[in-house]
Image: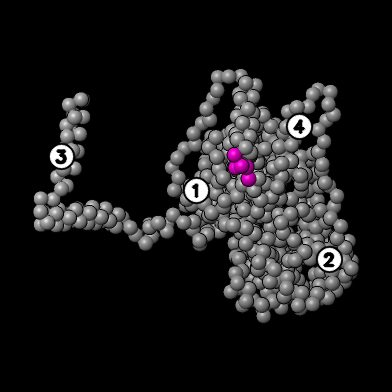
Amino acid sequence: MAGRALNSREREKSFSFSFRPASTSTFFLFALSLIAIAFFFFFSSSFHFIPNQNPKTSSHSSLPNSNPEYSFVTCLEKFLTSRSRIPKSESISKDSDEVVVNKLDDLMWNREMERLDEGLFDPSVLKVYVYEMPAKFTYDLLWLFRNTYRDTVNLTSNGSPVHRLIEQHSIDYWLWADLIAPESERILKNVIRVDRQEDADLFYIPFFTTISFFLLEKQQCKALYREALKWVTDQPAWKRSEGRDHILPVHHPWSFKSVRRFMKKAIWLLPDMDSTGNWYKPGEVWLEKDLILPYVPNVEVCDANCLSKSESKRDTLLFFRGRLKRNAGGKIRSKLVMELNGSEGVIIEEGTSGESGKEAATNGMRRSIFCLNPAGDTPSSARLFDAIVSGCIPVIVSDELELPFEGILDYRKIALFVSSSDAVEPGKLLTFLKSISPSNIKKMRANLAKYMKHFLYSSPAQPLGPEDLAWRMIAGKLANIKLHIRRSQRVVKESRRLCTCECKRANVTSLP
């Protein structure tokens, strides 16, 4: 080793002396040699990269896709066929549950303090840990839908194709697919997926409750629900907070119904907050913890060009297509039919959400100024979002309706709200609609064109799209979520019960 070191120093010394030119010509030749060597390395490194460059795969390809895909079926096909990984199992600790939970709690506290001390805490950017659940709760269910969705003969009791209903409630897919996509393919920056639980603000449960409800046999579905319940509630993070910082997608009101009462402290992603007690029991849902998300529209989107062309063709005053008889809060529909059917400028049609129904609804809404949106079995329906993306001003007759992202969006700019009692009073609704001035109609339709993007799920998820607004709304709840977690951890046996605020007061809407 010493000899090699000495030889090295001698070589350095001889090289330094050789740099002294013996003559001008020798120096000139030496300089030319250096230039030649430099050019050689430059061109060889350039040629090494040029053959791999392609307009489609150059550095621009790392930028997010500026042409998002909005079709659930198309995005799902690409998602499944491009992913071959099998979810890894969560590591199992040999410590007792209490020790593991306390360790995680300490780690999460330490990480939070570090972020605060280093000035890295940003409440507008959520850090989400996505559980790697067994494939039977995730990929297997997506493959089941993918392999059977063309079989539309499988209908619900009201005549709607179950696969279309799954698409309408597919918010669990859109949020999950965006969260687990490679960061180079994501556009949203207000939510980050983290790999360590101690770094997380929230925990996402990727269980496809709607697909399992509609496509599995009843007993098989209930058994899977029980397994999912056990898997999630066995997690240390769940035990630490009793699920208060966990996000559970239960967007179809029938999904996960048999066991969800055991997860009522989690953040539920819902279509609405039914107050009849038929779908959600008292104490299960409230605005302070849960989130209302829009349905996936069932009609083709009327873009700017479509809106311009349809402007002069909107010769129908009020349009409705759907099931005319519903249960619970939807009984208002039959009363509205009796009041409105046969009136001039009004089209009331019975129909379902199949392919023919989709085409009929698309055409009808694009020819209409106003679209009637009465309550269904629950206060909400996908029809509202069909109207919005069709440029048809919604007339909402649903006294208990809660709306998506209402902390961000002002629905008065794009919709009319009419109480049930006013809507069924003879002549009152049509008189009101006819009193809306052309300038106000034009203004509301212009606002609809601006609002459409807020209700279009896509891949990749877009800024100000529903995925983006969902995380913005949840970020606004985070401080309150942490308050309840910490308060629940420190109360003693004799303390008063933790308070909750359930806002059940109905909307008050009446015509002037």
Majority secondary structure of magenta residues? loop
Q: Earlier in the sequence, mark 3 or mark 1?
A: 3
Q: Which residue is mark 2?
A: 338
Closer to the chain start, of discs 2 and 3, is 3
Q: Amino acid at mark 4?
A: Arg
Q: Nearer the viewer, mark 2 or mark 3?
A: 3
Instruction: Determine whether label 2 and label 4 are within 8 Å by CB.
Output: no
Q: Earlier in the sequence, mark 2 or mark 4?
A: 2
The answer to whether the residue labelled 3 contacts the one labelled 1, judged by CB atoms less than 8 Å apart, is no
Mark 2, residues whose alpha carbon is within 10 Å: few (<14), some, or many (≥20)?
few
Q: Which residues are magenta?
A: 118-122
| Residue corresponding to mark 4 | 487
Residue at position x 47%, y 50% from top?
184
Instruction: Please give the label number shown on residue 454.
Output: none
Comes first in the chain, label 1 or label 2: 1
Q: Amino acid at mark 3?
A: Ser
**Amino acid type at mark 1:** Glu
Crowding around mark 3 (Cα neighbors within 10 Å: few <14, some 14 to 19, many 20+) is few
Q: Earlier along the polypeptide chain: callout 3 or callout 4?
A: 3
Q: Position of residue 211 (x, y in %)?
A: 60, 45
Residue at image location 73% in from the left, 28% down from the top:
489
SS class of the residue under badge 2?
Answer: helix
Mark sitting on residue 183: 1
Q: Residue at x 85, y 29 (%)?
A: 496
Three-letter amino acid code of the residue under disc 2: Met
Q: Residues within 10 Å of mark 1 (few under 14, many from 20)?
A: some
Element assignment for label 3? helix
Q: Is residue 499 above or below residue 474?
A: above
Q: Which residue is mark 3?
A: 14
Residue 360: x %, y % from top left: 64, 68
Asked if the magenta segment contains residue 328, the reply would be no
